[in-house]
Amino acid sequence: MYYIGISAYYHESSIFLTDNKKTNCFLKEESFSRIKGDKNFPKKSLEFIKKKYNLADHNIKFICFYEKPFKSWWDIFYYSIKNPIQNRNLLIHHLKNFNQGSIFFFSDLKKILDISKDKIIYSSHHLSHCLFGLTMCEKFDEYVFLTCDGVGEGETMSIFTISQDYKIKKLWSKLYPNSIGLFYSTITDFLGFRINEGEFKVMSLSSFGKPIYEKEFKEIFNIENFSMNMKYFNFHKDPSLSFSPELSKIIGKPYLDLDDKKIFQHYSNIAASIQKILELTIENLIKKAIGISNKKKVILTGGVGLNCKMIYNLAKKNILDELIVPPSPGDSGSAIGAANFAVLIENKYQPIRLKNFFLGPEKNQINSNEIKSNFFTKIDSDDEFLDETVKKLMSGEIIATYFDKNEIGPRSLGNTSLICNAKDIDVVNNLNTKIKKRNKFQPLAPILLEEDFDKYFFLQNNVKRNLSWMGTLCDAKEFTYNNYKSIIHIDGTSRVQTINNPQSLIHQLLKKLKLNGSDILVNTSFNITKDPIVFDLFDVYVNLKRMDLYFVLMDDGLYKIKQI
């Protein structure tokens, strides 16, 4: 019997299927639609798992949606009508888009899957985040669970505990429009980046500046009681513009050219200021959670958790024993939390436990040998194919990877990546700016064996677990500067991923790389900026052609694309 969780209609629609034994399958709709961050009902994803698992009413226990649709719609509607003149544009937008929202979840579902209505259940938005966090730990009663995002069902921050007998207790929450997530997104918009996509750019940019607007931003957002001065914002009135002219009076004009050195420094200072406010806010939220729960182990979910610089700085505060942020803490990961809710609703099954985070379908389930032979040629070599791959990496080639299963989060963890030798600065710069077309202020991430981490980097033990999925920054040691300067950010940090699974192909590749004089690879997602990560072999071929790259490492060998 299968349990299915679905997240949709806001950002990064996804679906997760499990039997809570051996079968786990996670899909994002963007993989099929090729629309990055696709928020539509995951129609193609559901069609895929329906066919793969022969889904029908008889073998589905529950399908759980990650929030309560009417409540989610009503909270914004109710907020709007309290001040209908002031919030006119928001109200009109909310009513006009009524038929595109989650209220139509059941009817969208029924178009694809004929299922009894009594098998459809609903979690709540922040609880779904929380229950994804539950998959990360065994002694869950030792943890306090925090959720912090933009907004979900009218909530922007929540604190939960879960007892040994799975009784979930919400200890506290903060309500819309008071949201540190929306404040950070507002600054993202102000700096000219896309909301829900560009926040990581603000985080990178912050390392180039100083928080000179910290005092002013503290007056906009109270870091003690988490309330906002709404005169600086416009998102609660009109969804087309997030900030009001009052914000510009403090920090200047929006949407300026970052290529101008003076503007770059000014915007870096703004980014550093909002980053500082975010970190102080979450520090106080953690202190509050520890105080009311008496637990010093914390699991943080919600989109705010993706800010790995914040996690790195919080670790140094020594206010907690452990901080875990799951690899997909935003809305897409909530499909897993919703499935967990479905499992727990019966009160007789253990919650879902995830031992790894590669939960996409096997590559041979989405591709055929015919497609592979039509588009790719296997490289014949006297060497074993991993040795041949290392040779090419050491000679300056950039290699794509496409093997095993896709990762569940927004960061490629080796299976669908572009990799190169981190010692070769010219190749790294070419990959970053010319091939991936990333901003110059965004560093690329290193990947190395867990056994080598302490040789090159330093990190507090209380967040080390997050290294497996690039969940935190860490400090580079002087030895790293001398040998791998290309993967160190301007502030001396790196967003490291460590590998400790000897069975994985990337682990075996790194082992062979060490024998050839390099311990570290650069690892970035296999996609061009603004596109989703590759999913099938058509995506692989198209992306390699667009990036003018030739080689891809697959499960059974090193391949070169055919010139068609």
Image (spheres, grey):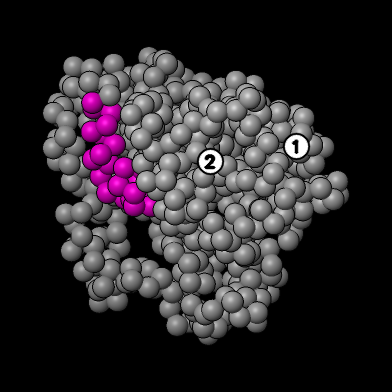
The residue type indicated by label 2 comes to: Phe
Question: Start and end of the magenta stretch?
Answer: 30-51
Query: Is 37 within the magenta?
Result: yes
State whether residue 243 is above or below residue 418: below
As drawn, is 283 to the left or to the right of 226? right
Q: Secondary structure at mark 1?
A: loop
Q: Which residue is mark 1?
A: 519
Residue 143 rendering spot, x and y as whole percentages: 58, 32
Q: Residue at x 29, y 59 (%)?
A: 76
Query: Which disc number belongs to residue 296?
Result: none
Label 1 or label 2, whichever comes before in sequence order: 1
Residue at 39 percent of width and 38 percent of height: 375
Where does residue 520 sit, x and y in percent of width and height? Answer: 72, 40
Query: Which mark lies nearer to you, 1 or 2?
Result: 2
Q: Can see residue 165? A: yes
Judging depth in this view, the residue of 66 and 82 nearest the camera is 66
Tell me the distance, in whole angstroms, between the alpha carbons under discs 1 and 2.
Answer: 21 Å
Q: Residue at x 86, y 46 (%)?
A: 479
- Residue type, mark 1 in image: Asp
Q: Name the residue rendered at 52%, 72% in the picture.
A: 191
Image spot of residue 508 (x, y percent):
65, 26
Q: Which of these two is toward me, 311 or 394?
A: 394
Crowding at label 2, few (<14), some or many (≥20) Cα neighbours within 10 Å? many
Apparent side of residue 28 relative to residue 500 in the rendered image (left or right): left
Residue 281 to residue 497: above or below? below
Q: Which residue is mark 2?
A: 551
Return the residue nearer the eye: 84 or 318: 318
Q: Residue 353 location, x and y as percent? A: 49, 23
Look at the image and tell me in which quarter the N terminus lies. top left
**10 Å neighbourhood of mark 1: few (<14), some, or many (≥20)?**
many
- As helix, strand or loop, the secondary structure at mark 2 comes to strand
Question: Which of the 4 image quadrants contains residue 167?
Answer: top left
